[in-house]
Amino acid sequence: MGGGIRARWQAAGHEVVAYDEDAARRDVDGLPTLVARLAAPRAVWVMVPAGAATDATISTLAGLLSPGDVLIDGGNSNYKDSIRRGAALAERGMHFIDSGTSGGIWGERNGYCVMVGGSGEAIALARPLFEALVEEGGWLHVGPVGAGHFVKMVHNGIEYGLMQAYAEGFALLRAYDTQLDLERIAGLWQHGSVVRSWLLELAEQAFAANADLDDIRGVVDDSGEGRWTVQEGVERGVPLDVITLALFNRFQSRDDNSFANRVLAALRREFGGHAVHTG
């Protein structure tokens, strides 16, 4: 996703300086050089795995940036971590924005969906970046620091439930008395059906490539946000029956190779480029 984000910024005329551990993907050899190349007030977008890697990157940048600079976490961080990081940076006079970013590997072509949390001043400074990433109506300032990643967390929980429903439905279609063409049915449902969606388009693509999906195993990993969503439901007393069952099915998938789970794995591969298990 980071590469797609960079491409959209460049296409919109922004000058982008990138650092990555992969030498083939970077413009500078380290974060100090990156910060030195940017004009104040600087805007630095962090796109690394949630948890320790994000903490380490933000900690390093906090020692390099200046008051008035903007640091944006565009990854899938836990919103509680974002609130903590925002408070720490505010003590240094720096702005922090948590940007829940959806769109997967297709965002560069189709535009991303961006859910941002932060102060009005910080959002105003970074607004041109968000506008370059999206099609019209594709970004929203949803609240203070933490709100962006909270909204993205719930978004991913809903995604779990939608994917589970499609997977189970196609598994039942496959069990019919005569062989049904799942690719054509997925395509049919794109025209006027109440269940039409981008996920359904991706299912059609997956069936077109391999109708039985027997090139992958039905092992469905989870990247953390579904767990956080369920935990929030427990803590806030909000029932999340469908999302919880979808999460638990992902745990169960690691012990079998059902067709429904191959559909789930295929959908993750199609929209996010996530690795699949084979063999």
Image (tube, rainbow, N blue to C red):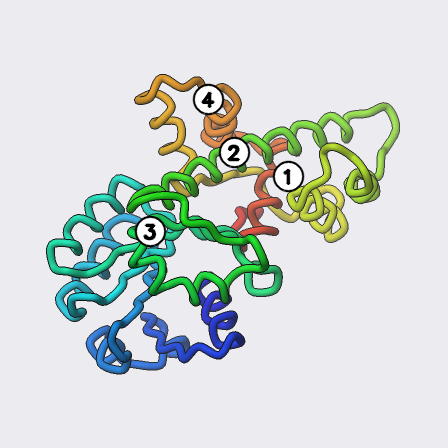
Q: Which residue is mark 4?
A: 240
Answer with left or right where residue 202 lies relative to residue 77. Answer: right
In the image, what residue occupies the spot 38% across and 48% down? 76
Q: Secondary structure at mark 2?
A: helix
Q: Secondary structure at mark 4?
A: loop
Please indicate, yes or no, whether residue 214 appears anywhere in the rendered image.
no
Q: Which residue is mark 1?
A: 263
Query: Considering only order in the chain, which callout, 2 or 1, is on the residue closer to the N terminus?
Result: 2
Query: Considering only order in the chain, which callout, 4 or 1, is on the residue closer to the N terminus?
Result: 4
Q: Which mark is residue 158?
A: 2
* Residue 259 percent across, percent down from the top left: 66, 34
| Mark 2 crowdedness (10 Å alpha carbons): few <14, some 14-19, many ≥20 | some
Determine contact: label 4, label 3, CB under 8 Å: no
Q: Which amino acid type corresponds to the residue marked 1 in the rendered image?
A: Val
Q: Which amino acid type corresponds to the residue marked 4 in the rendered image?
A: Leu
| Mark 3 crowdedness (10 Å alpha carbons): few <14, some 14-19, many ≥20 | many
Q: CA distance from mark 2 to mark 4?
A: 10 Å
Q: CA distance from mark 3 to mark 1?
A: 31 Å
Q: Which residue is mark 3?
A: 98
Disc 3 versus disc 2: nearer the observer = 3
Q: Which mark is residue 271?
A: none
| Mark 1 crowdedness (10 Å alpha carbons): few <14, some 14-19, many ≥20 | many
Say which quarter of the image contains residue 44: bottom left
Query: Considering only order in the chain, which callout, 2 or 3, is on the residue closer to the N terminus?
Result: 3
Q: Secondary structure at mark 1?
A: helix
Say which quarter of the image contains residue 188: top right
Q: CA distance from mark 4 to mark 3?
A: 24 Å
